Every structure is written in C-alpha cells, then in structure tokens.
C-alpha cells in the first residue's frame, strides 16, 4: 500500500488535497487511481499514534477512552498533549465513518469523548 506513496511529500500533498477538496477534486483523485480509501491508509500508517487493534470496536466508552489515552501517552511522535492527540484520533474516526456509523456505535464513541475528558481531569487533579 505504501508503494502508492513513494515519499512523505507525496503522502502529505495527497492528504492536503483531500482535506481541502470539493467533489471535483475527489473525482480527479479517483481517476488517478487514489483517493477512495485515503482515510484507511492514514489510519493504518498514521505517524501520530500506534493504536491497539480494534480500539474503536470496543463495547465500552471507558475502554475506548483508556486505550486511546494509553496510545497517546506512549507515543513520542505526537506534537500536542495526550488528550488532544487521543481526541483528534477519535474525532477523525467518527468523521470518516460518517453516515455509515450506526446510531448506537456513534453514541458509544461520543461517550468516549466525555470519558477521555474525565480521565484527563482526574489525572491532572
């Protein structure tokens, strides 16, 4: 899969294009053979956090929050705080799942955001 992104500059430009793109740019990306599954590529190869397998499939919001926070705290590549990195990855997953996310799963993931905040408050205080 990394063969389609020979260097970091190509990957970053592809991500930037998709982040700022409207439907016309998305159509052009598909014609070039990329674009459709870029978020899966980012999730699999992200330089931000090394996530546990199946973290977003856990049934407990608390378990999801704890796993994300553990991953963020272990990471030496993050730029911001552990909470910010964990929350960012959770928001990325929710946003990319979009309408395909069942209501119950969305409820659990939104609750995981609250749990993340609570975990960080308890660790700070």
Image (tube, rainbow, N blue to C red):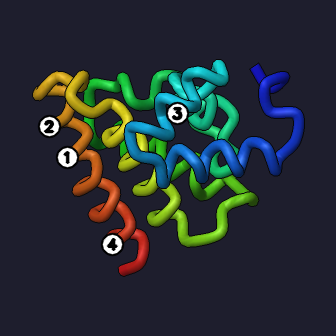
Q: Nearer the viewer, mark 4 or mark 1?
A: 1
Precedes in sequence: disc 4 or disc 2: 2
Q: How many marks?
A: 4
CB within 8 Å, label 4 to label 3: no
CB within 8 Å, label 3 to label 2: no
Q: Could you say whether the residue bearing mark 1 is in a helix, strand or loop?
A: helix
Q: Which residue is mark 4?
A: 121
Q: Could you say whether the residue bearing mark 4 is in a helix, strand or loop?
A: helix
Cα–Cα gap, marks 4 and 3: 30 Å
Q: Which residue is mark 2?
A: 107
Q: Which residue is mark 1?
A: 111
Precedes in sequence: disc 3 or disc 1: 3
Instruction: Using the image as rendered, state which of residue 118 and residue 82 is in the foreground.
Output: 82
Precedes in sequence: disc 3 or disc 2: 3
User: Label 3 neighbourhood size at 10 Å, few (<14), some (14-19), many (20+)?
Assistant: some
CB within 8 Å, label 4 to label 2: no
Cα–Cα gap, marks 3 and 2: 22 Å
Cα–Cα gap, marks 4 and 1: 15 Å
Q: Residue at x 45, y 55 (%)?
A: 88
Cα–Cα gap, marks 4 and 2: 21 Å
Q: Residue at x 47, y 65 (%)?
A: 84
Q: Could you say whether the residue bearing mark 3 is in a helix, strand or loop?
A: helix
User: Split into 4 quadrants, where in the image is the N terminus?
Assistant: top right
Q: Which residue is mark 3?
A: 39
Cα–Cα gap, marks 3 and 1: 23 Å
Q: Could you say whether the residue bearing mark 2 is in a helix, strand or loop?
A: helix
Q: Quadrant of residue 102?
A: top left
Instruction: Using the image as rendered, state which of residue 83 and residue 13 is in the foreground.
Output: 13
């Amino acid at each position: 899969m990394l063969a389609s992104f020979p260097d970091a500059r190509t990957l970053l430009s592809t991500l930037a294009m998709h982040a700022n793109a409207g439907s016309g740019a998305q159509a052009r990306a598909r014609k070039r053979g990329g674009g459709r599954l870029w978020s899966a590529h980012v999730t699999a190869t992200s330089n931000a956090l090394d996530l546990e397998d199946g973290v977003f499939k856990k049934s407990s919001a608390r378990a999801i929050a704890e796993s994300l926070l553990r991953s963020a705290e272990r990471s030496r590549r993050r730029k911001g705080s552990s909470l910010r990195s964990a929350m960012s990855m959770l928001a990325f997953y929710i946003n990319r799942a979009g309408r395909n996310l069942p209501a119950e799963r969305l409820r659990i993931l939104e609750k995981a955001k609250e749990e993340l905040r609570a975990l960080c408050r308890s660790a700070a205080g």
